[in-house]
Image (cartoon, helix red, strand yellow):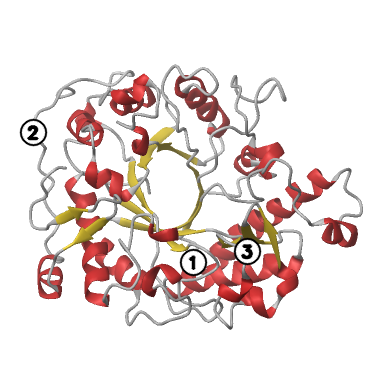
Amino acid sequence: MRQIARRSFVAGTAGTVGVALASAAVSGESAVAGESGEAVAAGPGEGRADRVGRPRDALRRELRGMWVGTVGNLDWPSKPGLSAAVQQAELIAYLDEAVDRRLNAVILQVRPSADALWPSQYEPWAACLTGVQGKDPGWDPLGTAVREAHSRGLELHAWFNPYRVANHTDRSRLAAGHPARLHPDWALPYGGKLYYNPGLPEVRGFVQDAMLDAVRRYDIDAVHWDDYFYPYPVAGQSFADGAAYEKYGAGFASKAAWRRANIDKLVQETARGIKAVKPAVRFGISPFGVWRNASTDPLGSKSAAGVQTYDDLYADTRGWIKKGWIDYICPQLYWNIGFAAADYAVLLPWWNDVVRGTGVDLFIGEALYKAGDPAQPAAWQDPAELSRHIDLAAGYDQARGHVYFSGKVVVADRIGAMARVVADHYRSRVRPPG
């Protein structure tokens, strides 16, 4: 694991990240961290031009981000129940890591499972903080994250999951005042998890209110959603929304069309709500990387993915772009160059063509977590694979940045793939697209 100046990360056997920092040290360096724009040491890409002839150090603005997940304590906090001071120190250490890596944005999961990382009037405190959903952690994580990120020249994108309620189906484990307990008809079990029903107008209104509460109260730079809309299909199971379809599905050709319309409404209404509250806040979505295969739809990509967002998650990601409902799209192109079913080198130009002329920015979600994983194909054992992704994207005029999954993997960087990206492409800090 890379040594990090000014702070100490400790990797545990479970792969979580712990931080040993006194609270006084945390507050003492925040005002000056990240102000330097000095170049990193010369790397393999030093002085090269990209594929369209621009010197690397003269590139236009680009997003360089990393996701920091909180659901199930994925990245942060390293475990539930830590003191407020330790939680804050761990969070700030991630922000400092972003600065060290010459990144300019952190996408922090602030509504992981219908609970909140701020004192929400709509939903309970997140269980990942204290281990008890609804228990006050004694500080304001989202407010702190925004303040500390901005002091380092980083954007803070607030990452929300609209419909996931819990990674289990036992409602008694939810906080006593949880909306899914107060309104048991709002949520459905599926695949061992609990989800809000997207087919209910009252649910759609509620989840928007819950998310817009954070937009109103904090100076976030963007609202960010990931790839969960209707749940991923589980073999042999059906999502039990038949009653809602009977009540609200008149006029639709099929249940699938009705489900897509429900997600369309959520996206369009949320976009309008954000602009009404704070016009400068951007709205971005990071979907699974395949809209539809060309074998299903001639407008689709030349892929053979087992999941298609349009058909399986009822998320018309291409349509949202064409209708201008979102400000950026960050497809999760979590495959290597040359992967037969979903080739990075095939999907990248497809998305590039989709966004052209729409005003929607294209950022690429990168699977750093696969680098060095022995279970992955041979390409992922090469520390240069991700750097080749950035090289390839430089030849496409609409690609305006990359986001890496996820925080603890950026820190651990087990085979040096992130360090290679930084050396090849991130010699100095740049500003994100305006």
Q: Residue 294 vs residue 7: left or right?
A: right
In what element is the residue under mark 1?
A: loop
Q: Marks 1/2: CA distance?
A: 40 Å
Nearest-to-viewer mark from 2 and 3: 3
Rate crowding at label 3 as few (under 14), some (14 to 19) or many (20 or more) other CA atoms within 10 Å.
Answer: some
Q: Residue 120 vs residue 139: left or right?
A: right
At label 2, the amino acid type is Ala
Q: Residue 238 vs residue 370: left or right?
A: right
At label 3, the amino acid type is Thr
- What residue does disc 1 label? 278
Nearest-to-viewer mark from 3 and 1: 3
- What residue does disc 2 label? 41
Residue sitting at 52 percent across and 17 percent down? 340
User: Which tag, 1 or 2, sits closer to the chain's start?
Assistant: 2
In what element is the residue under mark 3?
A: loop
Residue sitting at 75 percent across and 71 percent down? 185
